[in-house]
Amino acid sequence: MVTPSQGDAGEGARPASAGRAPAAEPAGSSGAPAGAGPGSAAGEPLLRLVGVGKHFGPVEALTGVNLEVPAGQVTALVGDNGAGKTTLIKCIAGIWPQSTGQLYWNGQPVQIHSPKDAARLGIAAVYQDLALCDNLDIVENMMLGREKMRGGLLDEIRMEQTARQTLADLAVTTVRSVRQPVGSLSGGQRQSVAVAKAVMQEARLVIMDEPTAALGVSQTELVLSLITRLAQRGHAVIVISHNLNDVFRVADRFAVLYLGRLVAVGPAAEFDRQSVVDLMTTGMTSRQVNGDSSSTAVAGSASGGEG
């Protein structure tokens, strides 16, 4: 584990409080998801993984992963190609059940056998393909599968009001009209619609897979601002990205995977870009961060010595 230390932040390090509201809005307040925030389950993280592993026949894709995902914070999940990032989030999102270990939601053990199980808990994943229908407009995409009815007909007015309010709450102001076809939107706008759809479904944990991949500068700014606002509203956010410049701007915490093992986890202030690159490529680092020299090896667990 990268050791916490005192003093000035190292090059590229981002203090956990940087760019973040002093505290998440309490549960029940305007704009905060119910049950989210620091008061949940007597300080328990929203999601906790203990000894989670996943194998496909003889291939061990994940081994002994111990990870906490707190509400109101952005956790950056990073690693090289094949490190197990996608496998891990698919276990959390119910695409694949884990082979070993246990997941805890608000301190209670849970079994997530399907995406429906994850959605019932309040877990939503926004994958790279976004799963949007280009031929439908923004309202129709956001309400797909959750349409509001009145007198046996679609209540178009109420659905439009709901979609418009959700986008406004997330400060998404770049779309011309909520009746625009999604196929006409930019990459950043499409990401915003996909995230707004997850929020509208009362997701308390939002997982974003490569949210800024192939986006331009202005579109990337839009998505990074949206990620920050999600955390400020009390949501837990997991971001997977190969763009370290982007994740250092929004991350409160880092979790680094190497060959299926979690080799480091901790506040963003304990890392700099070079230490993260070292961990991603070799599973260890001897970089000095905040003036303190620390070394992390694959054999050592990132979470208290387990796994």
Image (cartoon, helix red, strand yellow):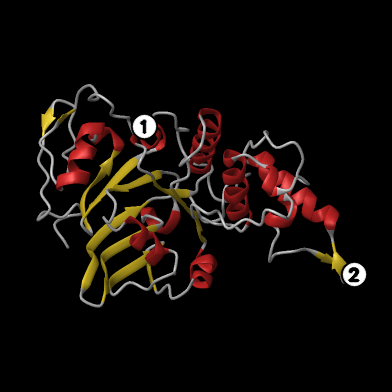
Q: Position of residue 187 (x, y in %)?
A: 57, 41
Q: Quadrant of the C terminus?
A: bottom left
Residue drawn at point x = 45 percent, y = 42 percent = 213
Q: How many marks?
A: 2
> At label 2, which amino acid type do we have?
Gly
Residue drawn at point x = 33 percent, y = 42 percent = 253
Q: Position of residue 306 (x, y in %)?
A: 16, 61
Residue drawn at point x = 29 percent, y = 39 percent = 267
Question: Which residue in the structure is indicated by mark 1?
Answer: 245
Distance, label 1 to label 2, CA atoms, is 51 Å
Between residues 148 and 285, which one lies in front from this camera angle?
285
Q: Label 1: state its secondary structure.
A: helix
Between residues 245 and 14, which one lies in front from this camera angle?
245
Between residues 172 and 81, which one lies in front from this camera angle?
81
Question: Which residue in the structure is indicated by mark 2?
Answer: 151
Q: Position of residue 287 (x, y in %)?
A: 13, 32
Q: Label 2: state its secondary structure.
A: loop
Residue drawn at point x = 50 percent, y = 39 percent = 232
> At label 1, which amino acid type do we have?
Asn
Q: Position of residue 135 (x, y in %)?
A: 72, 55
Q: Would residue 19 appear left or right of 285 to someone viewing this image?
A: right
Up the image or down, 100 lies above or below 132; here it is: below
Q: Residue furthest top?
A: 8
